[in-house]
Amino acid sequence: MTVRMGFVIITSRCIDCDACMVACRAENEVPIGFTRNWVRDSGAVGKFPIVKQMFEPGNCMHCEKPSCLSVCPTGATYKRADGIVLVDDTKCIGCKYCIEACPYDARFLNPVTGKADKCTFCLQRLEQGLKPACVQTCLGKARHSGDLNDPESVVSKLLNRYPARQLSPDAGTRPNIYYIDVPVAEIPSGT
């Protein structure tokens, strides 16, 4: 069975603490003012006294059909056999085509290197058997990662148990980040 790496995010567990963003910046030496991942805020929803606020963490979607790949004139953007989408700094010329092509706004031009930059799934950590920094430090256990094709992985178990959605399905990129919007009380704390 082919490995297909991805993320599952339980939105009701995100408290917008930004630990995932800080961990990513520290682990990957992301320049100040830039980020490889984010937490978006829905704003207050509802009517007093029943008001809630939801947060939506994200990063590069490591798409099945990445739009960033087809526009890269040098082949710097590539997709590994396990589905992780990366940028080869030795080939990137900083043209920004991939940045414009990404429907998720998940890339930026690194001002230090002059190259396209994005989430790498913390490949350096995966190779050591560790979780990505954002997953490891998520205080609310909102972020999960693993092999989407392995029925025993936490991400597969979550997807089999709860309804999930993907961002911008009309973009045709088939992202490998899935969002579960189930209330936190319905998900066991050990997950």
Image (spheres, helix red, strand yellow):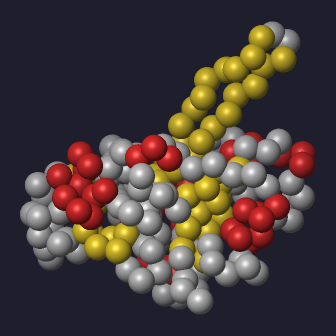
Q: Residue at x 42, y 52 (%)?
A: 172
| Left or right of 37, for residue 31 | left
| Left or right of 156, for residue 24 | left
Q: Residue at x 47, y 80 (%)?
A: 82
Q: Residue at x 90, y 45 (%)?
A: 185
| Left or right of 57, for residue 35 | left
Q: Position of residue 176 (x, y in %)?
A: 52, 62
Q: Position of residue 26 (x, y in %)?
A: 44, 62
Extreme-top residue of the structure: 48
User: Residue 128, relative to residue 97: is it above or below?
Assistant: below
User: Residue 13, relative to residue 94: is it above or below?
Assistant: above
Whether residue 114 is visible, yes or no, is: no
Q: Residue at x 33, y 71 (%)?
A: 86
User: Residue 31, relative to residue 56: is it above or below?
Assistant: below
Res 20 → quadrant: bottom right
Whether residue 42 is visible, yes or no, is: yes
User: Residue 50, relative to residue 158: is it above or below?
Assistant: above
Res 15 → quadrant: top right
Q: Quadrant of the C terminus?
A: bottom right
Q: Position of residue 115 (x, y in %)?
A: 18, 61
Q: Quadrant of the N terminus?
A: bottom right
Q: Position of residue 76 (x, y in %)?
A: 19, 71
| Left or right of 55, for residue 5 | left
In the rendered picture of this protein, how many numbered marks are placed on residues? 0
